[in-house]
Amino acid sequence: MKDYSVPIPVVRSLKFLGQNLRQARIKRRLTMALVEERASITHVTLTKIEKGEVTVSMANYAKVMFVLGFIDELSKIADPFKDDWGRVYDDKTLPKRVRYSTKKE
């Protein structure tokens, strides 16, 4: 694989995703040809997805996930309500106390 300046954890995650998608396809007894047709991608692209290649567009990964029934999981990846770090930062910016305004309009 060429160096595309992709962090190693990203490469590992995509490889793991590709393996999972391949297993899901096989468990559902779907041929590569059928998934390629339903996702409107080529055989080469599906092969790269199942290998976890970093050069494949996210849209193509998403299309395969849709075909396999995983599109809901994709939409939950960056859910702000499950963002523990974001909540920590929010807590730090909350005011220490709340005052009511005495101005009357």
Image (tube, rainbow, N blue to C red):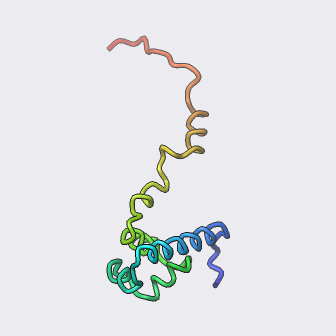
Above or below: residue 5 compared with residue 105: below
> Residue at the spot x=59%, y=39% of the render?
89
Above or below: residue 105 compared with residue 35: above
Of residues 82 and 24, the one nearer the viewer is 24
Above or below: residue 47 compared with residue 82: below
Of residues 58 and 44, the one nearer the viewer is 44
> Residue at the spot x=64%, y=84% of the render?
2
Q: Which part of the image, by quadrant, shows the C terminus?
A: top left
Q: Is residue 30 left or right of residue 21?
A: left
Percent x, y of residue 25:
44, 75
Above or below: residue 32 compared with residue 99: below
Q: Which part of the image, by quadrant, shows the N terminus?
A: bottom right
Percent x, y of residue 46:
45, 82
Percent x, y of residue 35:
37, 80
Task: Examine the image and state in which quarter residue 67 appears.
Answer: bottom left
> Residue at the spot x=35%, y=83% of the render?
34
Of residues 52 and 23, the one nearer the viewer is 23
